[in-house]
Amino acid sequence: MIPRYSRPEMVAIWQPENRFRIWFEIEAHACDALAEQGVIPKSAAKNIWKKGKFDVARIDEIERVTKHDVIAFLTNVAEHIGPDSRFMHQGMTSSDVLDTCLAVQLKQASDLLLKDLDKLLAVLKRRAMETKNMVCVGRSHGIHAEPTTFGIKLARFYAEFKRCRERLVAARADIATCAISGAVGTYANIAPSVEAYVAKKLDLAVEPVSSQVIPRDRHAMYFATLAVIAGSIENIATEIRHSQRTEVLEAEEYFSPGQKGSSAMPHKRNPVLSENLCGLARMVRAYAIPALENVALWHERDISHSSVERMIGPDATVTLDFALQRLTDMMDKLIVYPKNMQKNLDKLGGLIFSQRVLLALTQAGVSREDSYVLVQRNAMKVWEQGKDFLIELLADKQVTKALKPADIKKLFDMGYHTKHVNTIFKRVFG
């Protein structure tokens, strides 16, 4: 976790204090269930809750000797509880604690990420409504295509992040399972009812079959979902980066008073936020690969996945949390330039209406092949010589033979391209 790209609330989920607190709760809830079954004294279960404490520095000290984190934790807790500590971890294995704890942490992280997405969606909706009818040129392959509106662009991103939210809700549910099944997952030394009790207390589902670990396909899907969200972040960030280019300048990141764009060139106003978001998105996507590789473990368990998850769990969620907040702030303050949008619309002398002319010719009885030739030969004069498309069409006798000049002029109506904006917005926003 890099402090520069971290927010305290998400970081706290992955701190040792939170992790050991969850470990203790897993162990203590299991003791309560065992006490109800008469396996351990009820007084011992109560005493464990009452006296149970841990010290992170002391756990680290013990682990330097034991080379085992769960044993170090149990040893430290035992130093506070006394004789009743012998009833902790009855019939359990380390993975019961580690995997169940990871499920709780990922659930906690998901809740923060869902809040982040809600804030982003609210901003995207507001900005989409503000720019709903702000006409700009659409681009395919980076080249001027036909008119659209900036609001439609933002509505598209809103719909995309709404799907991201739905995927994260599903991934959260999938990852939130509890395994208290003992060595190799057969419940030989601990009853399944203990697992059910702990799961209920921690608001988790029971893992149907846990070899000794929770199956890693769940984790692979979770981190893949985070990767998809990161891809969507880069999608919108790339749009803003292109929009801020000097030759385009249809939208621009907010440039605050006192901000500097370049150490060498004082005039620079660079899209540093969207560029940063593209980089952060690459990192989050990268974490999906080791998560996928963790699915295949040896037999009932090995620990090849452990070191991976100790890194990608915190890093992926912390980085994505930061990126979503940065994207929200960027879009909230994004500056749009409708005059530049109109300037760019006019840049190609009316070529953005070429398809409508093509269709009108075909409807007038000209074959599609011939219509394409007529439109393209006039379009190339505009493209190569800077001519005006409408003037060239009106001067083309073959075009005016099929279409009246007045009808040709009507084809250059911008409103024709925005007539279904309300339909799109109704689909997206209801």
Image: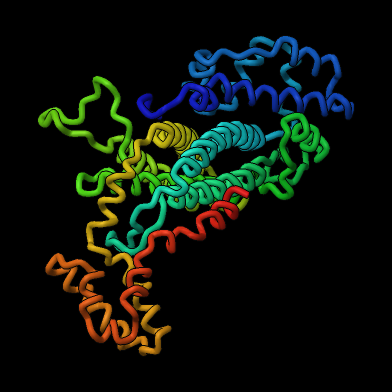
Name the residue rendered at 64%, 16% in the picture.
Answer: 77
Quick one: 132 or 181, which is closer to the camera? 132
Regarding residue 252, the answer to whether it shows in the image is: yes
On-image quarter of the N terminus: top left
**Does residue 208 appear left or right of residue 127 in this picture?**
right
Name the residue rendered at 36%, 44% in the picture.
Answer: 237
The coloring applied to the image is rainbow
**Does residue 380 appear left or right of residue 55 in this picture?**
left
In the rendered view, tell whether residue 151 sits above or below residue 87: below
**Does residue 391 appear left or right of residue 341 in this picture?**
left
| Percent position of residue 159, x then y | 53, 50
| Percent position of residue 196, x then y | 79, 37
Name the residue rendered at 68%, 41% in the picture.
Answer: 177
| Percent position of residue 246, x then y | 20, 44
| Percent position of residue 219, x then y | 56, 46
In the rendered view, tell whether residue 169 sits above or below residue 414: above
Q: Tally the numbered discs.
A: 0
Regarding residue 227, the answer to whether it shows in the image is: no
Name the residue rendered at 53%, 16% in the picture.
Answer: 56
Quick one: 64 or 235, which is closer to the camera? 235
- Quadrant hosting residue 30: top right
